[in-house]
Amino acid sequence: MATEHQSNTTKYIVVYVCILVIAALQFVVAYSNIDGSQMFTRMMLLACIEAVLAVLFFMHLWVDSRGLLWFVAVFTIFVLLAMQYGWTDSYRLLNGVPWAK
Amino acid sequence: MSYANLSVQGHAADGVPPVWAIPAKKMAMWLFIIADSATFAACLFAYGYLRVADPHWPRPFHSITNVAIMTFILVTSSLTMLFGIDAAKAGDKAKAFRWTMITAALGAAFALLHIREWMGLIDEGVRLFQNPWGSALFGASFFSVTGLHLLHVSSGVIALAVVAIRYQGGRYNADDIEITGLYWHFVDLVWMFVVPLVYLLNLSH
C-alpha cells in the first residue's frame, strides 16, 4: 500500500512537471518569430499533448476500465469533429458572398 | 417474463455490475465533462473564427507574467487535488481534507488573479461591445470565454470546500472527493486551451 502510494506520488509529480514544461514551451512559441498559423498549430499541438496527459494520468483514465477510455475518447472526438460541420457556412459568409469581396 | 421483471432484474442492486465497473456518480461526472467540453469547444471555435476573420483584432496583452502565474497555480492545484484523492482512498481523512482545502485555496487565488486582470482591462476601456483598439467583438468574446471558465473555477472552489467539509464530517466518502477531483482536473484542462487561444496569440510584441 505504501509502495503503491509512493509510486503514485512519483508518477503525479513527473506528469505535473511535464505539463509545466509543455506550458512553458507554449509561452516560448508565443515569443518566437513565426507566422500566425504556424504559431496557432504549434500551440494547439502542445495544448493537446497537455490535455492527453491530464486526462490519462490526472483523471486516471489510463488505469480505469478500457471501456470507459474508449467511450470518452470516441464520444468526445466525435462531438468535436461534428462541430466542424458549421465551418462551411462560416467561410461562405466570409468569402462566398458578393459583399465579402 | 414481463417488462416489470426485466426492469427489476436489470437494476444494479440485483447484482448486475455497473457499466464498466465504475460507480454511477463517476459515470455521471464523465458524461457531464463530455457535454461541458462541447460547450467550451463551441466557445473556443467561435472565438477562433472571430479572431481569424478580423485583421484588426486587438492585441492588448503586454506581459505574460499574470497568465503564467495563473497557469502555474491552476496546474499546481491539480497536483494537490491528486494528493487529496490519494489520501482519501488511503483513508487518511485529515490529510485528504487538508489537500482538498489547499486545492480550493489555490482555485480561489486563481479566481482573484483572473478578476484583477479583468479589472485592468476594464480600466483600459474594454467593454462587452467596445474597446479602444479594434474589433468591437473582442470584449464580448474575451469575457464570454474567460467568464465561462471563471464560473467553472468559482463553482469548483465552492464544490471542493463543501465536499471536503462533508467528507471530514463523514457524510461523503473517498469516491465523492475523486469525482469532485475529476471536475477540477477538467477545469485545469480547459485552461490549457484558453491560454494559447485567448492570451498568447494576442500578445503585443
Image (cartoon, rainbow, N blue to C red):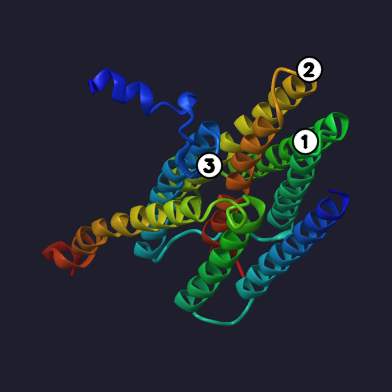
Looking at the picture, which amino acid does disc 1 mark? Ala
Q: Residue at coordinates 20% horizontally, 58% vertically from top-left?
A: A89
Have a look at marks 1 and 3 and say if they share a chain: yes
Instruction: Give the alpha-carbon distance from disc 3 to disc 2, as whole Å.
Output: 27 Å
State left or right for residue A70 relative to residue B80: left
In this view, the residue in front, A87 or B9, is B9
State left or right for residue B59 relative to residue B167: left
Earlier along the polypeptide chain: callout 2 or callout 1?
A: 1
Residue, disc 1: B88
Q: Residue at coordinates 18% horizontally, 70% vertically from top-left?
A: A101
Percent of width and height locating residue B166: 73, 20
Have a look at marks 2 and 1 and say if they share a chain: yes
> Vertically, is B87 above or below B62?
above
Percent of width and height locating residue B64: 69, 61
Label 1 neighbour load within 10 Å: few <14, some 14-19, many 20+: many
In this view, the residue in front, A72 or A44, is A72
Percent of width and height locating residue B190: 55, 51
Chain of the residue that carries numbered disc 3 in the rendered image = B
Residue, disc 2: B169
Label 3 neighbour load within 10 Å: few <14, some 14-19, many 20+: few
Chain of the residue that carries numbered disc 1 in the rendered image = B
Residue B109 in view in this figure: no
Have a look at marks 3 and 2 and say if they share a chain: yes
Earlier along the polypeptide chain: callout 3 or callout 2?
A: 3
Q: Which mark is residue B21?
A: 3
Percent of width and height locating residue B59: 54, 61
In this view, the residue in front, A91 or B180, is B180
Helix, strand or loop at mark 2: loop
Looking at the picture, which amino acid does disc 2 mark? Gly
Q: Which marked residue is nearer to the observer: mark 3 or mark 2?
A: 3
